[in-house]
Image (cartoon, grey):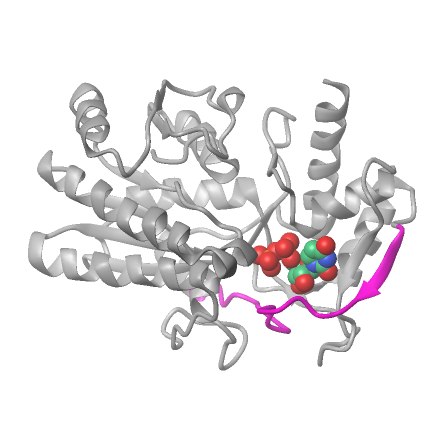
Amino acid sequence: MTGGAGYIGAHACKALAASGYLPVAYDNLVHGQEAAVRWGPLERGDIADRGRLDAVIATHQPIAVMHFAAFAYVGESVSDPGKYYRNNVCGTLSLVEAMLGHGIDRLVFSSTCATYGVPAKVPITEDQPQQPINPYGKSKLMVEQMLADFAGAHGLKSTMLRYFNAAGASRDGAIGECHDPETHLIPLALDAASGRGAPLTVFGDDYPTPDGTCVRDYIHVEDLAAAHVRALERLGNHGAMRAYNLGTGSGVSVRDILAAVERTTGRSVPHDIGPRRPGDPAILVSDVARARAELDWVADRSDVDSIVATAWAWQQVRANG
Ligand code: UDP
């Protein structure tokens, strides 16, 4: 598993181990945390390092690859697109070639709802046009297209999981989100409420949404992790290439999140209203029908209060630990 020391990758390792697999985390630890690798070995390496990939694959002989390793800051992708194309696209090419060189033909790929850009309609189905509006989303779409070509030429079977807004932490407090810098709404709102961070800036309250703030589909990271196990077990059942949106199907506004943070923490969230953040569509909500039908999966621990409560518990662990 590439990116196994990252936020979503570590949760996937945990879920795989609970289902009887031995996840080998391959991670360069640029953003990943060594302490998050607890359910299998850590192999330090970069996906662009073909020699290291070959050696690790030869040692562990995986049955399949889950590919989480990527840079994922939208703003940074705009200011430094080369970093995103080099790592996310060229790095994935190196990985796929290494896999095929060792006869591994099954891949679960971390894609994103950012590949849709500003959606033509919501909820978003998998066959809607993909017109990403930033280099991060474009880099992920390029990989999807590359995987399609490798399916045709080399029989690679891949499942593309297009995440909506991953959030929350494991319910046992073992692992959670540790981005540096942190840019995501829920950890920043919790930091503002606890006084550990600055007041939150709400990026725009003049959107055409019920309360004027952006609406997103927040999915608990444990639900996401569970979907990966399902995807692995069903890989290839619906063609060599299949994409699934992973969300809840429910839209939650920035103000809804602030209200949930206030319920959970018992504290108000100091905040002000700022301008819109460039590149933010007003509403992103997943259509969940395909994942439900074909992966036999639904997000069942992603109600906003569970997400915020687990994220809050994790922040307490980190603050005290
Ligand atoms: N957001 C905000 N203030 C912040 C961070 C995020 O208002 O300091 C909003 C952002 O505009 C978006 C939502 O919160 O509508 C979720 O943003 P986040 O960065 O968590 O995830 P993204 O949607 O970019 O994947």
Q: How many marks?
A: 0
As for residue 309 lying within the magenta part, the answer is: no
Residue at horizontal 35 percent and vertical 63 percent from the top = 141
Q: Is residue 210 above or below residue 227?
A: below
Q: Is residue 47 above or below residue 21?
A: below
Along the line of sight, the residue nearer the viewer: 134 or 185: 134
Could you tell me residue 72's position as x and y percent? 49, 50
Provide the residue span drawn in magenta: 270-289
Residue 276 part of the magenta-drawn span:
yes
295 displayed left or right of 64: right
Ligand 1 quarter of the rendering: bottom right
Q: Give residue 14's position: percent from left, percent from top.
A: 47, 28
Horizontal side, residue 288 vs residue 204: left or right: left
Give the percent coordinates (x, y) of residue 177: 61, 37
Quarter of the image with the C terminus is top right
Q: Nearer the viewer, residue 145 or 106?
A: 145
